[in-house]
Image: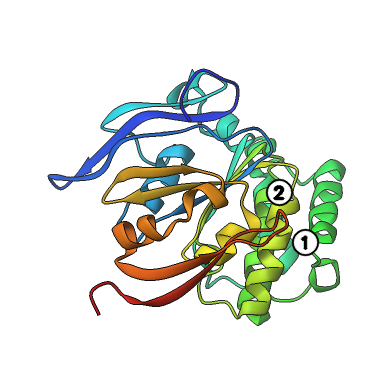
């Protein structure tokens, strides 16, 4: 999955920090409109890859492009109209309503000190409906549950009107009901989505393609059925597992048996 097409692409990117190689010649080019899951143990480079794709970090070597144009050439405001990012469990100490938080995503579309326009209001209202938060628009941000806060952050990203959406472990610390709810929402969005996840079975359920990182390198790329193997789980995660494949076209299911060697 590398280079040379419209959309977001990382071509052999590496990132070094503090003398340590965090990512090593990683290439990722998601198909337009697909949901790509980025998997790997803690410290494998998932968050760093997303930050490179978002233009928050610059690669030490290699190139990140959007529509074949290097990311730095886009400029921050223009890039924010195209690529949106949802970080892990965002928080704020400022007293804002849900509508206020979501409206922050319209900043790239307005000039400095410009008031919110009728179009801005309409886009925000639509995003609140799409994320199931219309009835909570005037509630204080601090009163929302973890799942509702993540939905609000996705709504904020949607009002940027992006074509690419990057999410860094959005299901962390959420009850399973909210994890399923959130990933259902994400997978149905008409966007190219790249999401870092820990749960292998959720990734198999909701992602079209998987990219598996281990110690900063890509060790597997493909569909969940192709990628999730007993051998890969042993190599990357150090676990024994069985992979159950349904007779239909449904996703594989990982059943963990224990730690390798025990």
Of labels 1 and 2, earlier in sequence is 1
Nearer-the-camera pick, 228 or 39: 228
Tell me the crowding category of disc 1: few under 14, some 14 to 19, or many 20 or more residues within 10 angstroms, Cα based.
some
Q: Is residue 240 above or below residue 58?
A: below
Q: Are marks 1 and 2 in contact (CB under 8 Å)?
A: yes
Image point (62%, 78%), residue name: 176
* 95 in relation to 187, above or below: below
Q: In this orientation, does residue 164 appear?
A: yes
Determine which residue is flagged by label 2: 158
- Residue at image position (73%, 57%) is 248
Which one is nearer the viewer's eye here, 42 or 124?
A: 42
Specify the farthest residue to the left: 19
In the image, 68: left or right of 123? left
How far separated are the C-alphas under marks 1 and 2? Answer: 9 Å
Taking depth in this image into account, of 146 and 198 the one nearest to the observer is 198
The crowd level at tag 2 (other Cα within 10 Å; few <14, some 14-19, many 20+) is: many
Give me the disc on residue 131: 1
The residue drawn where x is 66% and y is 33% is 32
Q: Measuring from the top left, give residue 42's x and y in whole percent.
A: 33, 63
Question: For the residue labelled by badge 1, is the local secondary structure a helix, a strand or a loop?
Answer: loop
The colour style of the image is rainbow
Query: Tag 2, which secondary structure?
Result: helix
């Amino acid at each position: 999955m590398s280079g040379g097409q419209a959309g977001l692409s990382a071509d052999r990117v590496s990132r070094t920090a503090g003398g340590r190689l965090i990512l090593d010649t990683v290439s990722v080019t998601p198909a337009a409109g697909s949901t790509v899951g980025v998997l790997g143990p803690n410290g494998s480079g998932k968050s760093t890859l997303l930050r490179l794709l978002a233009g928050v970090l610059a690669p030490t070597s290699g190139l990140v492009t959007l529509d074949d144009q290097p990311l730095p050439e886009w400029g921050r405001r223009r890039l924010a109209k195209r690529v949106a990012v949802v970080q892990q469990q965002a928080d704020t100490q400022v007293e804002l309503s849900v509508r206020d938080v979501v409206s922050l995503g319209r900043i790239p579309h307005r000039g400095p000190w410009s008031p919110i326009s009728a179009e801005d209001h309409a886009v925000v209202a639509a995003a609140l409906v799409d994320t199931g938060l219309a009835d909570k628009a005037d509630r204080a941000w601090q009163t929302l549950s973890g799942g509702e806060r993540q939905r609000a952050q996705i709504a904020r990203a949607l009002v940027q009107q992006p074509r690419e959406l990057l999410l860094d472990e959005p299901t962390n610390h959420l009850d399973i009901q909210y994890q399923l709810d959130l990933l259902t929402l994400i997978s149905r969005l008409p966007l190219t989505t790249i999401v870092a996840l820990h749960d292998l079975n959720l990734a198999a359920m909701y992602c079209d393609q998987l990219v598996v990182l281990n110690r900063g390198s890509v060790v597997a790329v493909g569909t969940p059925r192709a990628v999730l193997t007993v051998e890969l789980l042993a190599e990357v995660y150090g676990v024994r597992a069985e992979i159950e494949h349904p007779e239909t076209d449904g996703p594989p299911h990982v059943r963990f048996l224990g730690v390798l060697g025990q």
